[in-house]
């Protein structure tokens, strides 16, 4: 799924994943041309991206639908969180960070690059900080500042 018509991805690496029969296959390719338009297709938005592919076995057929991930920028050692944990309050991006005594504290953050699931935090958090992305019990509870929690650490 592509969510941007930004031409800055031209020349970037692109990971294409597809099943051939029941076997997963992957190709690293380069983006040649970004879509001129993106259209709604059911619950997704799609656009045609032209790529340069080394495909000597002809396993990847022209016009086939694949899952693709454009790697437009890599930030090594970045502090990142799940997108589900990022909130907007009074026009500011922030998170509910686990503070002393297992209490959540609203913390304003500045974001950087993101992918489908995660977002880089440029400022406001440090490596090792814990943030809330949802309340498990009771399932209908809203996350709020000052809320006492029992963390579920991975």
Image: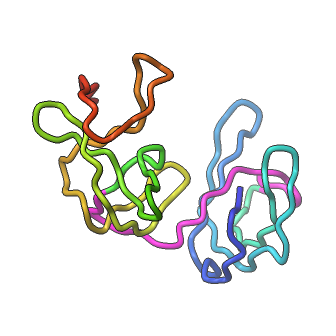
Position of the C terminus by quadrant: top left
Q: How far across and how far down the image is residue 17, in percent?
A: 65, 49
Horizontal arrangement in the rendering, residue 99 relative to residue 44 (left or right)? left
43 relative to 23, above or below: below
Assign the magenta stretch its main secondary structure.
loop
Q: How far across and how far down the image is residue 105, in percent?
A: 24, 45
Q: How far across and how far down the image is residue 114, in percent?
A: 48, 61
112 relative to 18, above or below: below
Position of the N terminus by quadrant: bottom right
Query: What's drawn in magenta, residue-wise?
Result: 58-79
93 relative to 139, above or below: below
Q: Is residue 71 magenta?
A: yes
Picture quadrant of residue 9: bottom right
Q: Nearer the viewer, residue 117 or 62?
A: 117
Name the residue located 11 percent from the left edge and 31 percent from the top edge.
101
Residue lying at the far left in this picture: please name it. 100
Q: Nearer the viewer, residue 28 or 81?
A: 81
């Amino acid at each position: 799924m592509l969510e941007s018509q930004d031409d800055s991805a031209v020349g970037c690496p692109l990971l294409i994943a597809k099943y051939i029969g029941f076997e997963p296959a992957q190709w690293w390719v380069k983006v040649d041309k970004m879509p001129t338009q993106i259209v709604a297709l059911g619950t997704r938005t799609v656009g045609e991206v032209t790529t340069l592919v080394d495909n000597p076995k002809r396993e990847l057929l022209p016009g086939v639908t694949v899952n693709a991930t454009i790697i437009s920028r890599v930030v090594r050692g970045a502090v990142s969180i799940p997108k589900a944990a990022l909130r907007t309050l009074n026009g500011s991006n922030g998170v509910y960070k686990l503070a002393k005594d297992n209490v959540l504290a609203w913390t304003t953050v500045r974001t950087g690059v993101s992918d489908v699931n995660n977002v880089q935090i440029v400022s406001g958090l440090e490596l090792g900080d814990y943030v809330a992305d949802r309340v498990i019990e009771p399932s209908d509870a809203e996350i709020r500042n000052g809320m006492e929690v029992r963390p579920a650490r991975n």
